[in-house]
Image (cartoon, helix red, strand yellow):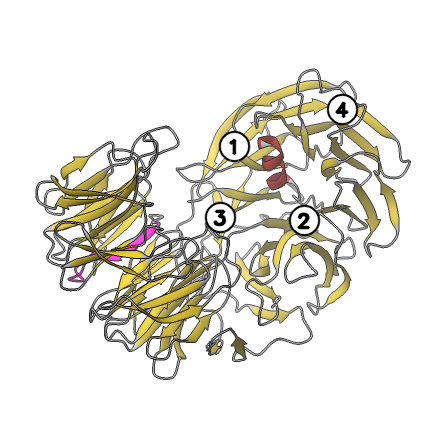
Amino acid sequence: MKAMRIAIRLIGLAWVLSACDPLEGATPYLVPAESPTPVEAISAETTTPSATSPVALNVGTAVIPPTPTFAPPLPSAFSRSIPKGAYAVLGAGTIDEAAISPDSAYLAVANAGVVVYRLDTFERVWSVPVRARQLAWSPDGRLLAGQYGDAVVVWLGHTGERVQFFEHPEGIAPGFRWSPDSQHIVTWSLESAQGMSGYLAMWRIDLGGPTFAIPDLGHVEDAEWSPDGQTIVSSRSDYKLIGDNSFLDLWNASTGSRLQEVAVKSEGYLSWSPDGSQIVASDGDPQGFPILDAHTLNTVMSLQIDTLRGSGNVAWSPNGEMVAAYGIDDVWLWDAVSGTIVHRIPVSHGLPYFLMPEPLSWSADSKLVLLSRYGGNGMVLDVSSGQLLYNFEDHDNGQVMISADGRLIVSNTGTVTVWRVENMQPVNQLQGTAAIDTLAFGHDGATLFSGSRFGITQWDVVNAVPVRSYYMPGPDDYQYKWHVYQIVLTPDNETLALSMSGPRPCFPCVKTMALATGAFASDFSATTAFAVSSWSPDGRYILWYDPDGHMIVTDRTGQDRAYTVEDVPTFGGVWSTDSKLIAYQQTMGDQPGVKILNIESGEIRTINVGNVTPIATPVSFSPNGRYLIVVNDKGDIECWNIQKSTRMFTIRDQSITNLAWSPDGKTLAMGTARADGGKILLWDVVNAKLLPPIEGHTDQVTALAFSPEGNFLASGSADGTIILWVMQPAAQP
């Protein structure tokens, strides 16, 4: 299964040949111009739904705020420095996190680095090349903290000067909270896969080191400061215990001593009442969420619930009168005094049960509840009416927050937009780019196409600027837009062949799109397909699977079948560069193993890898068709000579996610997913050795493609950037 999962990520790399050297006459380390050519946006649909159309929900009317109409180019979220050995960096990067300073003067953004802007003008104040996963301003607005790997970094909020670097004692710290006086930070960690138990640690800003660290807590889910900063409440599960193994703990914030401990149904989220006398816990009790006495942790009463799937986040209103909670399907509002339900607001948009939102937040006047959802839409709810006011539709990161003065709302859907609350009109916008899923060079080598969940972008390689964006909107009621996984430029240079997913029936499907207009030239929605694997490199054939796993090869319309493997399930079909051969894994039958199909003659050959590699998933042919890369059941990369059925080499690195051959077949580039950021490994095929790795991305490498002449290697990453690397000719033996 592990090899199969790896192979899924490897399928779909485009092999494109051409004959132009884009480096001729260019400076190897050219920095892109400050004012790139504006992006021309082309819609792939003949009609585009109105951005202001109401979204019909079970309760009320949710209005999607109007789409901003700022003239391109929009300000980029982060300007990356050019890594050593690279020609240019394309794309602003993903925007993972945003945070408004308490005085509403600054906006901090985390993507390929941390950047702080003036909120009113989006003038950049400072930036640092640190990939932070969480950002939080200190309550006094003087400091900014961000999670970076297993550490929390603290900067001066107005200058970017680093103040502290707190490295958590037991690996990755998934959460941290500022103390009310801005002098301390508490961090906690989950139980790790290596068996290390969770920690709770306290850090003093002016000292640097931890004032105390509490080990062996199991799986710590949340920790929250009391309003006066004297105590901390945390939730945890101890999986070494049988039976009731979830607890709430009350800690002395000065000494780290445990004041109270109480067993609960399950670990969950916590929130203090504004006066510090009570704590509400989302502990999954079917009888209701308990409100606890903040000194004894005895249950005072339970908030009534009907059903709340997911035991979601919980937050007390600033005025102390209400409690809000979210549990996948609904937002619940209770009277904090009586515990009775005030409103139950349906907000389900098909969010998977295992994806939980960020904590709920309230406006300072307690009139609005703001819901941030990873994997779903950000929302604004009216407390008095129980209506869903605004739905910030789109994409994987539905983050929404409100300024302390209540005048501005900031939404982050991959692009950060500032809205004026009084009329929900956009004030300003900050452009981000999505994680890169596929790359393909044009036949002239001077053009590069990238695909993501935002659609397709065409890049000018020499000038390192975007030329055109093909935006493909879905219907109003669909949560995601078109997601492009594979791009093949057909030989006529006029059509893109795409493997993609989107609104049904395209889930998945293949399409052809005219480059000149962005209109879909033909459409084959594989409504009966289990998966669409790939286009042939010449754009003539489509390889896909039916629900039983049988491989089918058709023409580009999906009608004329060129070949069908009907007898046994298969997996992992990949094309040779000349589009004549398909390698696939036969998982059952009399002769399971790796097969090579000649699409013209119908001849099938078996590569005898079964004695050495019981489960081998084909992932790539070499450019000359003589070698085949497979992934074995351990996740290792193996290269096999097709004619001799002999293994040429093995690369034992299970972090490899995708690969690409150089056009001359002398270099194999392999992208990785590692905790310290994605690297590119280079295998010298001629001399059978690994070359020094290429480093520059801050997240896993998700796509690789060589230019037709082999002088560029383009790498795409989950960090939302594309790096063009200058490649040197492979050494001779």
Q: Position of residue 365 (x, y in %)?
A: 24, 75
What's the distance in space between the residues labelled 2 and 4, CA to CA?
31 Å
Quadrant of the image containing the C terminus = top right
Q: Please identify, in this view, whether the residue under mark 1 or under mark 4 is nearer the observer.
A: 4
Q: Earlier in the sequence, mark 3 or mark 4?
A: 4
What's the distance in space between the residues labelled 1 and 3, CA to CA?
17 Å
State the mark number for residue 642: 4
| Quadrant of the rendered image containing residue 254 | top left
Q: Position of residue 403 (x, y in %)?
A: 27, 71
What's the distance in space between the residues labelled 1 and 4, CA to CA?
24 Å
* Residue named by callout 1: 681
Crowd band around label 3 with a 10 angstrom C-alpha radius: few (<14), some (14–19), many (20+): many
Badge 2 amino acid:
Cys
Asked whether residue 460 appears in the rendered view, the answer is yes
Q: Please identify, in this view, whether the residue under mark 1 or under mark 3 is nearer the observer.
A: 3
Q: Secondary structure at mark 3?
A: loop
* Residue named by callout 3: 718
What's the distance in space between the residues labelled 2 and 1, CA to CA?
26 Å
Residue 168 is a magenta residue: no
Badge 1 amino acid:
Leu
